[in-house]
Amino acid sequence: MTNAWIITTSNQIASLVEAARAIGSVTVIALGDEATGIAGVDRVVTIGRGSDAPLEAFAPAVNAVLEGAGADIVFAANRPVERVLAGAVAARLGLPLINGALRVSAGEAEVSRFGGLTQETISFPGGAVVVLEGGAPVEGAEVAPEAGSEEHYEASVSAVEPAGSGPANLAAARRIVAAGRGFKAEEDLQIARDLAAALGAELACSRPLAEGTAWLSKDRYVGVSGMHVAPDLYLAAGISGQVQHTSGMSDSKVVVAVNSDANAPIFEVADYGIVGDLYDVLPAITAALS
């Protein structure tokens, strides 16, 4: 049986567990104090609990566990710490690192290429490290954890700079309100936040708002090089709908688009479209939901 491993700093790993369980037995390497209450797997190995060192510094401990176990395939959640550890594991074990896989099986993965225009099948008979969205917490009884190695680099956090918005878990969101360049000022995003609150939705954005203006943090960016989401409802406000964005939300069940340009490409993928000024349309929808 293939041995599948998951590296995580959180219990929000339902998508990873589903992918790993389809391959074989599942062991979780849980780093830090927040990775508790993990269910639905065979084993849980804890590392770095109660430590002041940054969790990225525990790469030697993670590698020690995986080297000793002879891991076949390693999954890592698509979060900052886990991405660093995934790179360290791939380098130490000499395994390929695969980002944004659509489907994974033993020895093979399907990945999106050219902004979602095509898919490529990659074979890895000797194992791989795969970065996927974590998802929601796994329901069920907590698996009793066992302590792993605590070997780590001597490192400390010298400063902390708060992000412009709170951490997002778009992969687990059932509803998403996404903002684009149709918003004229950062403070105007409150219109989208109000609608998201009325819908019980997460706030997301297109790439320019995360990497251009930095109005929102990068964990809220949906697109080919950002988050890939599949909510029940995806409401795109002021987003033109280029393939670089739509490839990250194409699996959404229902797509609603609000744009003042009737010819915007977003309407080609939308189930419902509203041609109008988002400054008028979004408050009207919010009021109707109140």
Image (spheres, rainbow, N blue to C red):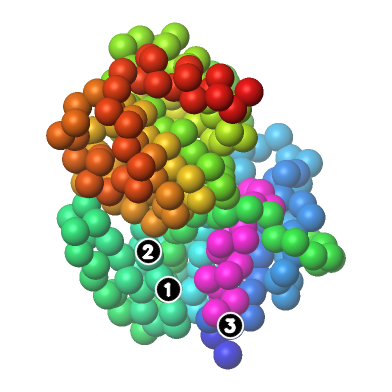
Image spot of residue 200 (x, y percent): 62, 35
Q: For the residue labelled by badge 2, is the local secondary structure a helix, a strand or a loop?
A: strand
Considering only vertical position in the picture, is 20 above or below 237? below
Q: CA distance from mark 3 to mark 2?
A: 18 Å
For the point 38% across and 65% down, which residue is it?
102
> Is label 2 in contact with label 1 (beta carbons under 8 Å)?
yes
Residue 16 in picture, x, y percent from top left: 56, 63
Q: Which mark is residue 24?
A: 3
Quadrant location, the N terminus: bottom right
Q: Is residue 184 left or right of residue 133?
A: left
In terms of sequence position, does the residue under pointer 3 or pointer 2 come before the other?
3
Quarter that holds the C terminus:
top right
Is 113 contained in the magenta span?
no
The amino acid type found where label 2 is placed reads: Ala
Secondary structure under the numbered disc 3 in the rendered image: strand
Q: Earlier in the sequence, mark 1 or mark 3?
A: 3
76 relative to 101 in the view: left or right: right
Q: Residue furthest left?
A: 263
Say which residue label 1 marks. 104
| Residue bounds of the magenta highlight | 3-22
| Magenta stretch encompasses residue 4 | yes
Q: Which mark is residue 239?
A: none
- In this orientation, which residue lies closer to the viewer: 273 or 119? 273
**Around disc 1, counting alpha carbons within 10 Å, would you say few (fewer than 14), some (14 to 19), or many (20 or more)?**
some
Which of the two residues, 290 or 66, is positioned nearer the viewer here? 290
User: What's under tag 3, amino acid-wise?
Assistant: Gly
- Compared with residue 277, is residue 248 higher up or lower down, i.e. above or below? below
Q: x, y percentage for residue 5?
A: 58, 70
Work out how far the residue at label 2 is from the one at label 1, CA to CA, in angstroms: 7 Å
